[in-house]
Amino acid sequence: MIRGLVFDFDGLMVDTEAPALESWVEIYKDYGCDFPVALWSLNLGGSGKEFDACAYLIEQIGQSLDSSIIRARRWKRKLELVEGQPLLPGVNAYIIAAKELGLRLGVASSNTHEWVAGHLERLGVLNLFDTIVTANDVTHVKPDPEIYLTAVARLEVEPEQAVALEDAPNGLLAASRAGLFCVAIPNPLTRELPLDHADLLLTSLADVPLEELLAMVAARRHEMSNGSARS
């Protein structure tokens, strides 16, 4: 029985990742450099420390730059691009359906509480979640399972009673390690990344209503259980 639904935030609920990418691409272009999207993608859903785009830029141009100025400029541009971004297709319908079904709702993000809660408040859905777990609440972010373990503990459900909705490998790995059923809904930036830890793969939440997804989860678990029994 599924009792909890846990959303990732960036790239899953709101398209913050395309603006994050575009803000760096613009800066690199100003310096005559191509932005290394494949390297930057290592950060998606993680701590953001997997690849340092500012340090890489300085290395590429071979001259010193004030990294604080570069980072501040990039952050300002990212905020401009993210502001006004809506919930991604199907997200609001899932939130409404989950409340109607009596599921406990959570958000598990490696970003900051200020970032996640600020956007959820802007979009009018903040008060619909039972818990929001961010980098401010844990010692280790994704792909470590701590964020998801904290989320299910706060929701008062067991890991096997919860479904994680994720878009990127770091988040899927974290949820899988925590024992949740993992559903991948990749966006254009994460579609080509390895999604091996997903138990199910969807193209969009708008394509599959929540009740249908829960039936798919039950069927997939039954199939996995039978497979384990046969082995």
Image (cartoon, rainbow, N blue to C red):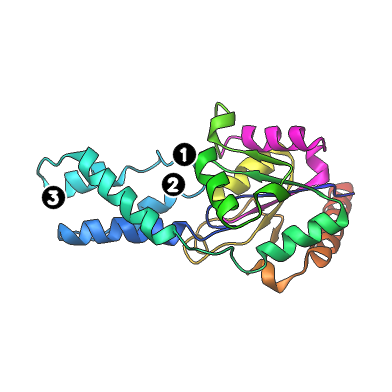
Does residue 57 appear to the left or right of 77 in the view shown?
Answer: left
Q: Which residues are magenta?
A: 143-168
Is 19 included in the stretch rendered in magenta?
no
Q: Residue furthest bottom?
A: 207
x, y percent for residue 217 = 81, 58
Spatial distance from mark 2 to mark 3, Cα to Cα? Answer: 22 Å
Within the magenta stretch, is there residue 155?
yes
Side of 2 relative to 58 (left or right): right
Which numbered circle lies on residue 207?
none
> Residue 196's spot in the image, x, y percent?
61, 53
Give the residue at mark 3: 61
Label drawn at residue 43: 2
Q: Which sits earlier in the primary sequence, circle 2 or circle 3? A: 2
From the image, tell me which residue sits under label 1: 47
2 and 3 marks in contact (CB < 8 Å): no
* Nearer-the-camera pick, 123 or 28: 123
In the structure shown, which secondary structural element does the residue marked by tag 3 occupy? helix
Give the amino acid type for the residue marked by disc 2 in the picture: Asn
